[in-house]
Amino acid sequence: MKNFNELSVTSSYKESNLQLVEQKACIVVGIANPRIKIRVEVLLSESPEYQTIYISSGSETGKLIEEADLIIGSGITAYEGVARRKPVIVVGDYGLGGLVTPDTFRSQYNNRFKGRINGMKDESFSLESLEKEIKKAFSLTFQELQMMSNQIITYQNI
C-alpha cells in the first residue's frame, strides 16, 4: 500500500528517454446514494494526489477493489474491501461511518457498513471530516488489515 505522505515514482524507458511516472493513490468509490456520491466526488476532484475510480457495475467490483489503495463506500463494497485487506472508509445512506479500524470493525460490521452508527437516513457530513479519514486510512498496518479480514471470514463461518 502506498503511504499518503510519500511520493511514489517509477521509471520507464521510452525512446531513449528515462521518464519518471508519478503513481497516485488509487481510491475506489462505491456509493449508491447519488447525493452522497456527489459530495465525495467534489472532495476527490479537488485532490490531484489521488486517482479516483467509481464503481458502476457489480461485475467489476472485485477487480477494482483488488487494485485499490483505499475504498470509500458502504454495504457490500465496504465489506469486500475489508475482506480483501484494504483500508475502508464507510460512507453511506446513514452518513460518515469513518475509517474501519480494529476498534470500530465489529460495530461497523453489525451495522452492515451503512454509515454512522445510529445515524439517520440521508445524514449529512462535512467534507473536512471525510478528508481527515482519508489521511488516517493510509496509516493502517498490514497486520491490522489482515486481522479485520480474518474476522470477516470468521463471522461468515458462524
Image (cartoon, helix red, strand yellow):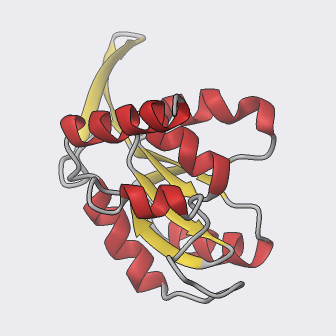
Residue 143, compared with residue 94, is above or below; it is above
Q: Residue at x 51, y 34 (%)?
A: 158
Q: Is residue 55 left or right of residue 143?
A: right
Q: Residue at x 25, y 38 (%)?
A: 8
Residue 31, compared with residue 55, is above or below; it is below
Is any part of residue 52 visible from this angle?
Answer: yes
Residue 135, compared with residue 154, is above or below; it is below
Q: Is residue 8 left or right of residue 157?
A: left
Q: Residue at x 30, y 56 (%)?
A: 101
- The image shows residue 125 at horizontal and vertical percentages of 53, 87
Residue 43, compared with residue 53, is above or below; it is below
- Where the N terminus falls, by quadrant? top left
Task: Kindly indicate the quadrant of the structure image that contains residue 29.
Answer: bottom right
- The image shows residue 75 at horizontal and vertical percentages of 65, 55
- The image shows residue 74 at horizontal and vertical percentages of 61, 59
Q: Which residue is nearer to you in this view: 108 or 11? A: 108
- The image shows residue 135 at horizontal and vertical percentages of 29, 64
Is any part of residue 1 visible from this angle?
Answer: no
